[in-house]
Each structure stands twice: as structure tokens, then as C-alpha cells.
Image (cartoon, rainbow, N blue to C red):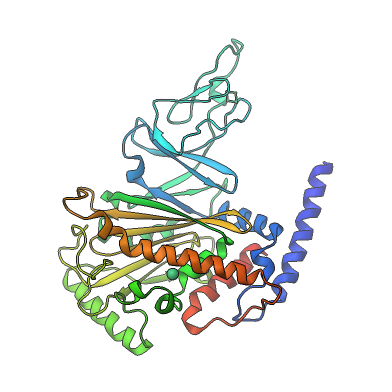
């Protein structure tokens, strides 16, 4: 009782602190230093945003066969994503029901059963407790299976939610189907996965991802290929031409903005937006040329790229011949991870149908540059001389993200 009351008082103290900090923010301006530096704010971020929202944990091809598994770790929680004997994917909490040890230590692998290394309680792939050594005859195994958390697979993308009663996922699911479906992501294959450790608060990494104001100065390789860095009228014109090309291929990818501040009530936010490539470019490669076999319904290139987001931690982009998944994971107040996954058609063979270095080049150079600018952003914000400046119109998504964020943690 005493502890609960203390926790309630602590929460009230944090509520007041967050309200005070939020009130200081000038409209359309970046956040105050404390939002990127205060451990209490970080704790609230994790609870509300990472434990309360749907998170993409990877592509289903990472656990293609029964027994294949990988761990997903966020904010001190560890979850085993495993394909069962019935071929269903499940998310099992990696905490032993005996005395709480992690059951699985390996980041990924293949298992017939999960045996806790501590006292060898053994769990089935569906989490049921199969055996517990030397326990009394009346011990009830059925009440001691690994805990499960909510998991949904949409077009090959695995989403989990830690809440007992998660917010709605139906609207986001529609957006993902409409965006990833035409690219055949449901049967795609993971070609590469790279984790960038970033010495910055997770919000700086996400704000950076959603704005392209920095694309021309920081990503010359990207800006040479993609047309979303031109005057507004020009962008509107080239995007309209791209939509015509997509329609001629018999493909319809509706652009929907239900993200953050525009999410339907009680639903996870999501959006899909499309953008043209520059003249003569068709894919995200060194010269803008094809890089891997066409995917899904694409029988030709439309010289366009589709961006879609789910919540604020999971981002995706699709070219007709390969795809990218970007996931942002908070670690500590001032460290985070950015995981980048490359997808290709399910039957595409490395070295035969695509060249690994060509496939991964653009988003490796882009991600490395992002890591550098995000870390320097954090270092500048940590200065006693930092004051939040105004977002430009090209950073409207970052500004929206921040508005949504403040309401979410309030
Ligand atoms: S803590 Fe897992 S078997 Fe004891
Ligand atoms: Fe960037």
C-alpha cells in the first residue's frame, strides 16, 4: 500500500513536471533540452509510447521455419518471437515462470524447446511449460507457461503490443496492406539487417527520419535519386506523373494520412505517401537503375517510392524491386538503436539475382550519415546555450510528431 501510494505520488510529480515543461514550448518550435535529457521523461516515453503502441519487430522471413526465433528487446523487456509447430508466430515474454531468469539468451536461432539455463524448466514453442525438474507431484504446469503478448502479422510485417488491451490496429493494418501488398512484402525475404547504435535520445532519431529538410545537405546520394527535394509545385507535378505510371501498371496505392495527430480515435496511427524518383531513376541504387528482381504486382518500374509509417517507431519504404524497414528503439535517455532491414523478392538469390553491395549501398551511406547528424544534434542540444528553434515548413512531420508526443506523454 505504501509503495503504491509512493508510485502514485511519483506519477503525479512527473505529470506536473511534464505539464510545466510542455507549457514552456513555443508553437512550431523544437523541444526543450530536458525532453532529450531527463530520465523521468524518458521513463514516461517508454511507458506511453513503446509499451502502449504497436511496434514492428521484424519481417516474418526472419523466423521462416517452425522453431526459428529471434529476440526483440526494448526498455528492459525481452520478447521471444518464435514460429510454432503450427507455423504461427508468437511473442513470448522471455521471463521464466520459475524465478524469472531470461529463458533464452541467444539473439536468434532455432529451438525445439526453450530450456531455461538456470534450473532447466523447459517450454514448448507455444510457451506452454513442458517440464519442471523435481517439482512436487501436485505442481500445476498448465498455470506456468511463458506469458504471451499481442502479435499481428500484416504483409509479412510482425507487430507486437505489450498492453493487456492494446489500442486498435485495424486502421493501421489497412494502411499496411494497401502499401506493402502491391510490393509483395508478404512473401518477401530479408536480405540484410543492420543495427546502428546511436548516442542520442530516440526522438532525435525519429524526428530526423520524418523530415527531408536535411536530405539535400546531408544525403547527396539520396537527393540525386529522389525528387522530393524540389520546389513544391515541381514536386506536385512529378508525383502526379508518377501516379499515372503506377495506375498504368494496374496498381493502386492509396495515400492516406492517419498518422500521429490524424490517427482515428483509439487507433494506432499510420500513413502512406508516395514520391517520384528523379528523371530516369527507378530504384534506390548507386545509379538509380534496377537493383533486384521486381516484386509483387510490379511488372515494370513506376519510378516511384512508397513511404509508410506505423506509429512513431516503425517506418517502411518500398521500391518496385526492394524494400526497407526502419525501426527506432530507445535504450537509455541518450542512447537508441536504429535497425535497418532490406527486403527482396522471396526467391531472389544473392550474387545471382542481385548484388549485395549494390542493394545495400544507398541506405547504408544514408543511415551512417543520419547516425552522425543525429548524434551531433544531441551534443548541441546538451549545450547550456541550446534554445529550441523553429521548424521549417519542410519539417511539418517532425513538428506534428512533437505535438502528438507532448499530448501522448501528458
Ligand atoms: S529461473 Fe528458470 S528454471 Fe529457474
Ligand atoms: Fe536522413
Q: Kindly indicate the quadrant of the structure image that contains residue 405.
A: bottom right
Q: Quadrant of the N terminus?
A: top right
- Which of the pair 54/277 is nearer the observer? 277
Which quadrant of the picture is home to ligand 2? bottom left
Name the residue located 61 percent from the left edge and 11 percent from the top edge.
136
- Residue 70: horizontal and vertical position, in percent? 43, 40
Residue drawn at 55 percent across, 14 percent down: 133
Residue 122 % position (x, y)? 49, 22
Report whether 88 appears left or right of 6. Answer: left
> What is the total number of numbered labels drawn onto the structure image?
0
| Left or right relative to 42: residue 160 | left
Q: Is residue 160 above or below residue 317?
A: above
Q: Residue at x 48, y 53 (%)?
A: 55
Placement of 344 over or under 239, stated as above or below = above
Q: Residue at x 40, y 79 (%)?
A: 216
Q: Quadrant of the rendered structure where residue 255 is?
A: bottom left
Q: x, y percentage for residue 299? A: 15, 63
Residue 324 position in % (x across, y down)? 35, 59
Q: Is 276 placed left or right of 373 in the picture?
A: left
Residue closer to the observer: 256 or 81: 81
Query: Can the viewer see residue 263 in this picture?
Result: no
Q: Nearer the viewer, residue 250 or 35?
A: 35
The answer to whether any part of residue 395 appears in the image is yes
User: In this image, 16 relative to 394: left or right?
Assistant: right
Amino acid at each position: 500500500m505504501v509503495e503504491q501510494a509512493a508510485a502514485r505520488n511519483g506519477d503525479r510529480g512527473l505529470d506536473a513536471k511534464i505539464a510545466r515543461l510542455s507549457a514552456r514550448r513555443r508553437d512550431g518550435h523544437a523541444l526543450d533540452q530536458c525532453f532529450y535529457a531527463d530520465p523521468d521523461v524518458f521513463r514516461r516515453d517508454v511507458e506511453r509510447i513503446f509499451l502502449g503502441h504497436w511496434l514492428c519487430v521484424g519481417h516474418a522471413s526472419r523466423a521462416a521455419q517452425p522453431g526459428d526465433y529471434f529476440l526483440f528487446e526494448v526498455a528492459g523487456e525481452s520478447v521471444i518471437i518464435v514460429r510454432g509447430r503450427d507455423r504461427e508466430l508468437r511473442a513470448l515474454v522471455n521471463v521464466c515462470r520459475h524465478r524469472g531468469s531470461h529463458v533464452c539468451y541467444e539473439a536468434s536461432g532455432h529451438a525445439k524447446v526453450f530450456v531455461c539455463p538456470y534450473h532447466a524448466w523447459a517450454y514448448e514453442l507455444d510457451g506452454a511449460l513442458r517440464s519442471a525438474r523435481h517439482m512436487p507431484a501436485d505442481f500445476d504446469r498448465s498455470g506456468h507457461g511463458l506469458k504471451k503478448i499481442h502479435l499481428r502479422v500484416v504483409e509479412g510485417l510482425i507487430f507486437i503490443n505489450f498492453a493487456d488491451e492494446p489500442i486498435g490496429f485495424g486502421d493501421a493494418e489497412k494502411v499496411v496492406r494497401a502499401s506493402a501488398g502491391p510490393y509483395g512484402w508478404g512473401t518477401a525475404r530479408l536480405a540484410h539487417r543492420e543495427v546502428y547504435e546511436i548516442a542520442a535520445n530516440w526522438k532525435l532519431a525519429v524526428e530526423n527520419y520524418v523530415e527531408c529538410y536535411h536530405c539535400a545537405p546531408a544525403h547527396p546520394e539520396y537527393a540525386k535519386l529522389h525528387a522530393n527535394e524540389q520546389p513544391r509545385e515541381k514536386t506536385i507535378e512529378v508525383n502526379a506523373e508518377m501516379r499515372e505510371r503506377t495506375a498504368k501498371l494496374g496498381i493502386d496505392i492509396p495515400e492516406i494520412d492517419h498518422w500521429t495527430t490524424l490517427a482515428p480515435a483509439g487507433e494506432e496511427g499510420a500513413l502512406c505517401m508516395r514520391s517520384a524518383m528523379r528523371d530516369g531513376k527507378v530504384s534506390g541504387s548507386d545509379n538509380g537503375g534496377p537493383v533486384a528482381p521486381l516484386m509483387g504486382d510490379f511488372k515494370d518500374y513506376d519510378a516511384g517510392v512508397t513511404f509508410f509509417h506505423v506509429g512513431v517507431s516503425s517506418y517502411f519504404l518500398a521500391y518496385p524491386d526492394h524494400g526497407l524497414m526502419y525501426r527506432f528503439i530507445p535504450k537509455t535517455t541518450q542512447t537508441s538503436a536504429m535497425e535497418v532491414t532490406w527486403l527482396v523478392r522471396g526467391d531472389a538469390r544473392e550474387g545471382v539475382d542481385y548484388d549485395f553491395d549494390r542493394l545495400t549501398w544507398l541506405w547504408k551511406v544514408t543511415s551512417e550519415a543520419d547516425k552522425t547528424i543525429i548524434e551531433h544534434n544531441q551534443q548541441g542540444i546538451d549545450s547550456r546555450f541550446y534554445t529550441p528553434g523553429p521548424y521549417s515548413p519542410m519539417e511539418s512531420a517532425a513538428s506534428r510528431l512533437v505535438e502528438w508526443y507532448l499530448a501522448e506523454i501528458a
